[in-house]
């Protein structure tokens, strides 16, 4: 890669193994070429998986991350590898969702960030987890996350 905003990236454009756990995962950021503009970014991960920390059985979620960038953007390959790192990681739904949101907020220092974790039922109960850094920006269109409440056959 050329010596520009992408020059410090270690995963994009090369082979990168899936980290064994979220603590080993390296999230990377790039300078926001539209810094100063007020806009929203959305990442959707409809096939997120982790493990129940008690039973080791798989848990599945539909994650939606919205953020208003400041000076930084998350590099999407590093985000994908970070999310993959939960695949063999045991944690409750709340911990997974909030951990992802906090790691992104710490890395990016966004103007605003929210995550919705829409978890599929286990034991007959779906769990939805929401976390955000502050009040939703009033002067910017932030669409609904578009994930309906779980209804089963109902």
Image (cartoon, rainbow, N blue to C red):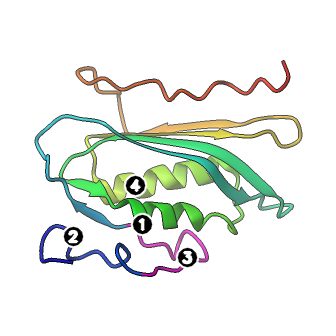
What is the crowding at mark 4: few (fewer than 14 residues within 10 Å), some, or many (at least 20)?
A: many
20 is within the stretch colored magenta: yes
What is the crowding at mark 3: few (fewer than 14 residues within 10 Å), some, or many (at least 20)?
A: some
What is the crowding at mark 2: few (fewer than 14 residues within 10 Å), some, or many (at least 20)?
A: some
Residue 74 is left or right of residue 61, and the answer is: left
**Which region is colored magenta?**
15-27
81 is within the stretch colored magenta: no
Residue 95 is left or right of residue 144, and the answer is: right
Q: Which residue is mark 2?
A: 6
Residue 127 coordinates in the image, percent (x, y): 71, 37
Look at the numbered disc 2 and give the secondary structure of its residue: loop
| Residue occupying image coordinates x 50% and y 67% | 81
Q: Mark on residue 78?
A: 1
Q: Are marks 3 and 4 in contact (CB under 8 Å)?
A: no
Q: Are marks 1 and 2 in contact (CB under 8 Å)?
A: no
Give the Cα separation between the discs numbered 1 and 3: 10 Å
Give the Cα separation between the discs numbered 3 and 4: 17 Å
Q: Is residue 134 above or below residue 45?
A: above
């Amino acid at each position: 890669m050329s010596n520009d905003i992408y020059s410090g990236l270690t995963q994009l454009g090369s082979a990168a193994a899936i980290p064994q756990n979220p603590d080993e995962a390296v999230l990377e950021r790039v300078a926001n070429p539209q810094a100063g503009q007020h806009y929203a970014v959305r990442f959707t991960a409809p096939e997120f998986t982790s493990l129940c920390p008690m039973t080791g059985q798989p848990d599945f979620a539909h994650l939606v991350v919205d953020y208003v960038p400041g000076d930084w953007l998350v590099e999407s390959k590093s985000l994908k590898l970070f999310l993959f790192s939960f695949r063999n990681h045991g944690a409750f739904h709340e911990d997974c969702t909030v951990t992802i949101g906090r790691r992104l907020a710490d890395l990016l220092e966004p103007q605003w960030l929210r995550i919705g974790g829409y978890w599929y039922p286990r034991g007959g109960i779906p769990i939805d987890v929401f976390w955000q850094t502050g009040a939703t920006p009033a002067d910017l269109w932030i669409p609904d996350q578009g994930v309906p409440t779980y209804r089963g056959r109902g």
